[in-house]
Structure formats: structure tokens, C-alpha cells
Amino acid sequence: MPVHYKILLSILLLGTLVSSAVLLSTSQVDSKLTLRLGHAVDLEHAVHKSLVYFQQQLNEMSDGQIELEIYASGQLGTERDLIELLQIGSLAMAKVSVGPLEAFVPEMKVFSLPYVFDDEAHFWNTINSDLGNELLLSPLAVDLRGLAFFDAGSRSFYTCPKPISSPDDLAGMKIRTMKSQSAVALMRELGASATPISFGELYTALQQGVVDGAENSPITYYKARHYEICKNFTLDEHNTIPGIVMFSEKVWSGLSAEQQNLLKAAIKKTVIFQRKLWASDTQVALDALKAAGINIIYPDKAPFQERVQEFKDSFSGTPVGDILDKIEAKR
């Protein structure tokens, strides 16, 4: 089914009364610009709250001349759908995970490699450097413009039948992953069986034993209530995969220089807001998980890192390997 029809169908199913203008990325009446942005998370998520902040900043900084309409909770489709809509110019903006973006922009695969960053400081040193800016703009090759990276924390394992303290414990376990080649390869290296399942189906899959566990940030583990089923949370922090706020290059090129500068200024303030909110929500989630009696494990990361080193080394001499070397130099 063509992506335009999927969008229209999803909106009709949700009972949202909108005009056919929702299928357009922007509208402009009497010099007022309306931009439409889609994302896949719920209204209580730190990402949505940050995008509402971005919406407010745009409105204030433009004296009401730039309005942002936010379509949350996957109203406009999956993250892959949003990326494709941006490419053809039918949507102005989207926030997606870098994970699905690697299918469009090979350079982004570097974020899906395990243990790329030593810690949070190493991650932000990279993101805020010239290299980070190069990665942000690498989607231009496929008509996408990165405006900013959003903090999405680090991904760790949570499991139902048994806790994970070392890579050996993962042997034979079915672990839900994102639909990412790199994520699947990582599970293979650790001895687990990767099972890509859409996030919306994961709670039921865990409940029915279709998978033995999954991996995500503390915030997502808590807010999705997956801790109700999987009582073991292993903070191995094997991936640090950021979110990215993107603009359709087809739409961006039609904006005035003033409009573009206002968008850049507003997103810069939003990144600071989002990073603080993410840190706060992470601590709230961890405190709530401890209060709920969840078995939180702080494993020795060295065995995990050693197990995947050969996999990382296999990228040597490739564009992704070159980026990895530059990231390691940021230590």
C-alpha cells in the first residue's frame, strides 16, 4: 500500500478529523508557516515533551509566524514511513531513532555498533564536535537534513526467565531487537537469537514467551511496563543509539534564510532541554524500578566488550570503520 494511503488510513482509524492538508508537509497563509512533524512515541515521553518545548520556542522566537503541528504516537506511520515521507517532501519534520536510519544512510550504522562510547562524556564530546556535525548532515545524500541529535540513553538487556550477568548467560536466548542489521549481528555475536518484533507487539510477545527478553533504555523499560513481566534488568549499556530530529531537504530548501535560522536556534535550545529532561526521567525510572523490586544488575562490561571486539574489528578499512576510529580518538 502506498505510504500516502497508509497515513490517511491511520488518521481515519484514529478518528482524527483533519483536512487533506495533513498530507502536505507545510502550509503558508499570509506569511505564516505551518510545519508538520511526526514521531512514534507517546505523549508522556521525554521526546514528545521536548518537541512541545521546541514548538513553543518556534512560536515565541518567530512572533507566531512559524507554527509546528505535532503528530505523535505513530499517527503517521512507523519510523521508516516517516523517513520515506521526509524524502519525498510530504512531511516537513520527524524525530526517529538513528537505528532505522542506517538502512538509508550507511554512516549511521556506527551508532549501532557495541561499546562505541566509553561513557556519556565521550558520547557528547563526539556529538558536539565537527565529526558529530558531519554525521548529522550525512543524510543529505538521501534528501534528509539532520537538525539535532536527541539523547536516548544507552540500551541494556532485560530478561524474563533468568538474569544476565555475562555474555554466556545470553546463549540460546531469544532477544527482541530493532529491525536493524547491526542489532541482529550484535545478538549473534553475544550468542543470543535476535528476534525483530515491532515495539507495539513486544509486551504481548514477552508475556507469551515468544521472546525471552529485550533491550532498551531504563526509561523505555519502565514506561512500557515491561518490568511487569521481565524482572531482571542488566545495565550492560551495550549501545548508545541517539534519536535524530530531521527535516525534509526538499522542504528545507524552500524556506527563507530567516526561517532556517529560527529553526536552528530553536532546536539548539531544545537539545539542552531534552538532555536535562532525559537525565531526570532516567533517574526517576531507575528509582521506580528499584522500588518495584526489580533485580538490577551492574555487570562487568569487559567480557561483553571482549566478545564483540572481533565484530567491531571487521569494519576496519570501511567508511564505518573510519568513523569508528575517529570516535575512539575523541576519548
Image: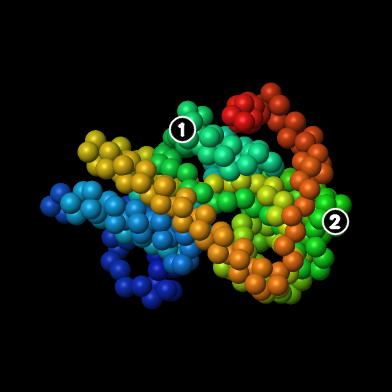
Instruction: Pick whichever, 289 or 116, lies toward us.
Output: 289
Q: Which residue is labeled 2 in the image?
A: 169
Q: Nearer the viewer, residue 308 or 151?
A: 151
- Percent position (x, y) of residue 109? 61, 39
Q: Quadrant of residue 328?
A: top right
* Callout 1: SS: helix
Q: Is residue 31 left or right of residue 66?
A: left
Q: Is residue 278 above or below residue 260?
A: below
Neighbourhood count class around disc 2 (C-alpha, 10 Å): few under 14, some 14–19, many 20 upward: some
Quadrant in which the C terminus appears:
top right
Q: Residue at x 70, y 72 (%)?
A: 293
Give the amino acid type for the residue marked by disc 1 in the picture: Asn
x 59%, y 37%: residue? 122
Label 1 belongs to which residue? 133
User: How are the residues colored?
Assistant: rainbow
Name the amino acid type tagged 2. Answer: Asp
User: Circle 2 sits in a helix, a strand or a loop, which is it?
Assistant: helix
